[in-house]
Image (cartoon, grey):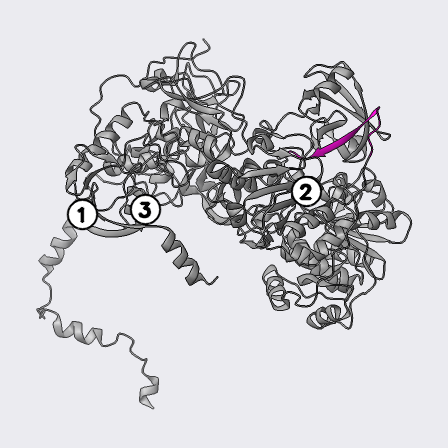
Amino acid sequence: MDNSLTPRSNDLGLTAAAKANAPIESQEAKSFAKQLQGFWVTFITMFKKVNTVEYPEVKEPTAERFHGRHQLNRYDDGLEKCIGCELCAWACPADAILVEGESNTEEERFSPGERYGKVYQINYLRCVFCGLCIEACPTRALTMTNGYELADESRAKLIFEKEDLMAPLKAGMLQPPHPMAPGKTHIDYYRGDIKGGSNG
Amino acid sequence: MTPEQALLETQAAVEMITVVIDGFEVTVPKGTLVIRAAEKLGIQIPRFCDHPLLEPAGACRQCLVDIEINGRAFPKPQASCTIPVENNMIVKTQLTSPVAEKAQAGIMEFLLINHPLDCPVCDKGGECPLQNQAMSAGRPESRFEGVKRTFEKPVSISSQVLLDRERCVLCARCTRFSEQIAGDPFITLIERGALQQVGIYEEDPFESYYSGNTVQICPVGALTGASYRFRARPFDLVSVDSACEHCASGCAMRTDIRRGKTLRRLAGDDSSVNEEWNCDKGRWAFKYLTSRERVASPMIRGEDGELHEASWPEAIAFAAAGLKGKRAGVLVGGRATVEDAYGYSKFARVALGTNDIDFRSRPHSDEESSFLSSVVLGLKTTYKDIDKADQVVLLGFEPEEESPIVFLRIYKQLRKRALAVISDAPVASRGSVKLKAQLVSDISSISGLTSKSVILVGERLGEKVGALSAAVDLAEKSGAKLAWIPRRAGERGAIASGAIATLLPGGRPVSQASARVDVAAAWAVDSLPANPGRSTSEILHALIVNNLDAVVIGGVDPLDISNTALSQLLNSFVVSLEITHSAVTAVADVVLPVAAVIEKSGSFQDWQGSARTFEKAIADSLSRSDVRILSMIADEMGTPINLPTVAATAREIAALGNWDGAAISFEKTSTVKTLATEEKMNLTSWRLLLDLGTLQDGETNLAGTARKATARISKTKAEKLGVNEGELISISSDLGSLKLPVEISEMSDNEIWVPRNSIDSQVIANLGFVNGQVTVVKA
């Protein structure tokens, strides 16, 4: 009858084993001085400079090469660097990137050369921020920013589309589609010989 | 002959030679190339220009090996793709000979000097032999410091093939294919040295029906298909083996799917049928799948006369209510798979209780019905018979236009051993010119056929009274092998499945009670209808004279039958099972969407009668095969046909087997001579491969290479009409007319030929018939 009232032990005898192996502790009461010494650490820490910041009101810069959110870069006139080659998707160990290429036409040009990325998605639920995509990119179209604020309330919102990833237009840049700079070819773009907007 | 005897015979005929490659002995037939003998051992010698189905060229020099015969070594490494094996030959490949290895590395370096580093934008990237071999045999760093040769890119050598000349390694696979396999030498290597490039003749673009194969065999990304350009990478694609739905040649295909969307189709490898080739229609005509005209959901015609979307149960119930207890017929188009045709056949007999079923959505005759139900299923002629034939006779059949792989087979033998080809066409098509066909005006005038000759009969022969009888006579008289080659993929399977009034599945004649009892027992029904059924045109006629109330139509274009067919459907209850909206769905009372080939499993029977099975390529497609939908309607009508899936249907077909009783005999018809009058001309027409066919919808790149519609008349006739080449003439019948530019050809003065279903030349719609008397004047 007694047994039925005792709660069944579920520690599988671990407590007993731990006790058996534990170093023999001094059974003497801790001295008051020892306790003071402990509280002193706490007390002194109160006056030390803290490591944490009041996020999100205060934000510390990350390390310079921190792997954060991706960005799709532009040439200086605003044309996209991405050629839709899918090498990033190929390199990705987490299968987080989806790219679909398309042909540029004379009427509708998004990047120098023949090909551009029409669909570009990065799934941040999958991305492990390893940076292999950046290494794979043959045109330096894809780079990583230091942005780390990648939390949201739905899965769908964490699949970033091309427009979420494109670098913002800087002064002198024109929103594609627009033609290449007069007399220039995709080679000139690739070599970095393009400065400023193509249409004035 | 048993297989053992056959083997002995071939062994006796061919001398075998033993060679040593990398220390291993291998015995191969005399004439085998070293590179092929090495393959047999599993030793892969790198190569670009070598292709087992093309003549050796030795163009790329990548396959260099060290060779020694009778103890005497060649002073330099030799191209293993051009040297046949010989006795006492010792071959050392890159695996055992440092000389061969260095030679191959050197060639790779040469090839890469001018090859651009544009793999990221090249469609071949990821499945590129050059990329792969550069990785395995190339240098990590280039030693070349000059400027690479560049060309303007890409050049469209036709509306569907693009050429990036700087990527070309000058292997000449494409030019050899065009010349040796397709017989269309429209591309060739031009210029010399570093500027050598693939070029086209300016006045003759690369408008070959087989141009897609050059894209497939190009070992680099020099030739790419316009419709697949920049669409995907190999790792995006799921490849599924499939069969081609476009004609009765029966090509094996590979369908590449990306995220539920077909991006490209390639020729599959089947040495007994298409070898490794296919035609451009099979390769590129698949956009109809994603057409905006696709029927998305079941539709019911409401009180207001418009089609409204409905749920499946509603639409099935509506169709069943409209068919139950009514006199109804069934029209099955040529796109039906064997399983679907079986479903239609069983549905007509069990659920509708009628033999009014016909798969022929084209002009037809009673003579043809008799031919189809008595002769066709017994025909055993195959591609191999063409390979061995003494002569090939083409009757009512243009292989290049109507069954392109049959053309390739005949052309192969023509090149190899000058096979004699005879055709009954009134004018030489481009295919006939390539085949050097001898044109005869009358089937009875053909003589000198042997038992190893092959007579290929096309579906159009049935349009001429007595012609099928004459063809059968010819075959019986000479002992030549007969074959019937329909244009559409589903036709032979439809006959075998009993989608014709006179036959039950397995070739069982409706007229024989034992055959009906046989099938009734298998289907677990009391009896099957015994009254003779109607043909397509009779069914359509019965609809307007109120002998029939309703009709079930699957995949029929009314303009393929007659220009009145559509109006004949207007006042009856029409159930349409269709892929895309069409003329039939426009008048149908219920429209039920069905799956296209890529979205379902099933099988076709090619013209040889062999099954071409295919699996569903788009795994998560919601579209259903015709047979499943028919089964649901039959359930709703209370007369179940129990064919819930394609697999179950295939099992039932296999269990039922073929008829082993006597076949019905062919009732021959005598030929009727049509007398041309002075003012009228005899019109002949056939379809071109690339035309206005429904399954080619939406593929503009492909349509760009379609041959231009012209009316072909003789020189004397043109002079009489006062027209020059290229000037318009007007061709008219009692029902209408059409205008076409003249092409002066060698033909009889009272004959005129026009394409049957091309732009500006839809013969049935414009003239009301396909063969007949027309008035021709200068327009």
Dot label at residue B580:
2
In the image, the segment drawn in magenta is B675-688
Q: Secondary structure at mark 2?
A: loop
Mark 1 and mark 3 on one chain: no
In the foreground, B548 or B14 = B14
Look at label 1 and name its amino acid.
Phe
Q: Is residue B202 above or below residue A156?
A: above
Q: Where, by quadrant of the figure, is residue B174 drawn?
A: top left
In the foreground, A125 or B202 = B202
Q: Is residue A182 visible?
A: yes
Query: Residue B677 lies in magenta, yes or no?
Result: yes
Residue B483: x, y in percent?
62, 49
Q: Is residue B291 visible?
A: no
In the foreground, B47 or B183 = B183
Q: Secondary structure at mark 3?
A: loop
Q: Secondary structure at mark 1?
A: helix
Q: Residues within 10 Å of mark 3 (few under 14, many from 20)?
A: some
Look at label 3 and name its amino acid.
Lys
Residue, disc 1: A43
Residue, disc 3: B30
CB of mark 2 within 8 Å of CB of mark 3? no
